[in-house]
Image: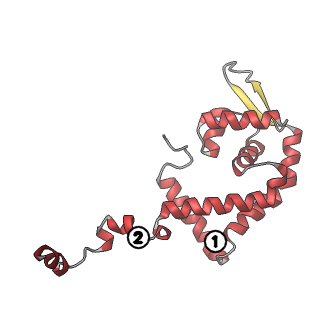
Amino acid sequence: MAEAKASAARPAADPEESDQHWRGGPLQGRPGFLIRRLHQIHTSLFAEECGEEKVTPIMYSVLSALAQSGPVDQTTLSAAVAIDKTNMADILERLRKRGLVRRRVALKDRRVRLATLTDAGRELLDRIDERAHRAHLRTVEDLAPAEQALFVELMNRIVEAKGGSEPARR
C-alpha cells in the first residue's frame, strides 16, 4: 500500500521522454503507422483509377522509369525505382510476359541484360498516365495546394536524409 501511495505521489514522466508515449499512445500519432496507412489508401485509389489495366503502383513506376530512361540494366532501374534487384527481376518478368517490356543482352557487356519498353508498354502508359496522376492527386486532395507541395517537400527531405532512392536494406 505504501508503494502505491509513493508511486501516486511521483509526477508522471513527460510522455515525450517516455517509451510509453509510443507504446501506449494512439497509433495515429506514429509516423510509421500513418505512412503505412497512407500507402494503403494510395494503393486503393490507384486500383480504383487503373485497376482495369491490372497494373500495380510499382509496375507503373517501373514502366514510367523505363519510358524516361530508355534501355537500362536491372541494377540501375532498381535504384531509380528504389526496390531491390530480386523484386525488380520478378516485376520485369511479369511485365515481359504481358509484352510490356523486352529484355536483351547489352552489346558492350554480354553479362548485362537491358530492359526496354515495348510499343504495348508505351501504349499502356499512354492509357493510364492521366488516371495514375489522378490517383496521386486524390491521395493528397484533402490538403490545400500549398500544403500538398509542403507535404511532398517534407517527404522528399526525409527520404533523402534516410538514404535517398536506394532500396531499404533487409
State the residue in front, 30 or 63: 30
Identify the image quadrant of residue 114: top right
Image spot of residue 70 (x, y percent): 76, 38
Q: Residue under circle 2? A: 25
**Vertical order, 154 against 85 (above or below):** below
Separation of marks 2 and 1 at Cα, in angstroms: 27 Å
Q: Is tag 2's residue or tag 1's residue first in the polypeptide sequence?
A: 2
Per the image, label 2 sits on a secondary structure element best described as: loop
The answer to whether 31 appears left or right of 91 in the picture is: left
Query: Residue 14 sits in which quadrant?
Result: bottom left
Out of 45 and 127, give the one closest to the viewer.
Answer: 45
Tell me: residue 99, above or below residue 63. above
Residue 149: x percent and y percent?
63, 70
Q: Can residue 23 be seen in this view?
A: yes
Which residue does the image show at 60% across and 42% down from the upper left? 83
86 left or right, relative to 135: left
Furthest toward the left, the residue is: 2
Q: Name the residue under label 1.
A: 148
Farthest-out residue, front:
1
How many badges with numbers are in the image? Answer: 2
- Residue 167 location, x and y as percent? 55, 43
Q: Which residue is drawn at 33% across and 67% down?
A: 20
Which label number is shown at residue 20?
Answer: none
Amino acid, disc 1: Gln
**Quadrant (top left/top right/bottom left/bottom right) for the N terminus:** bottom left
Q: Residues within 10 Å of mark 1 (few under 14, many from 20)?
A: some
The answer to which quarter of the image holds residue 35 is bottom right
Q: Is mark 1 on a helix, strand or loop?
A: helix
Q: Which amino acid does label 2 sit on?
A: Gly
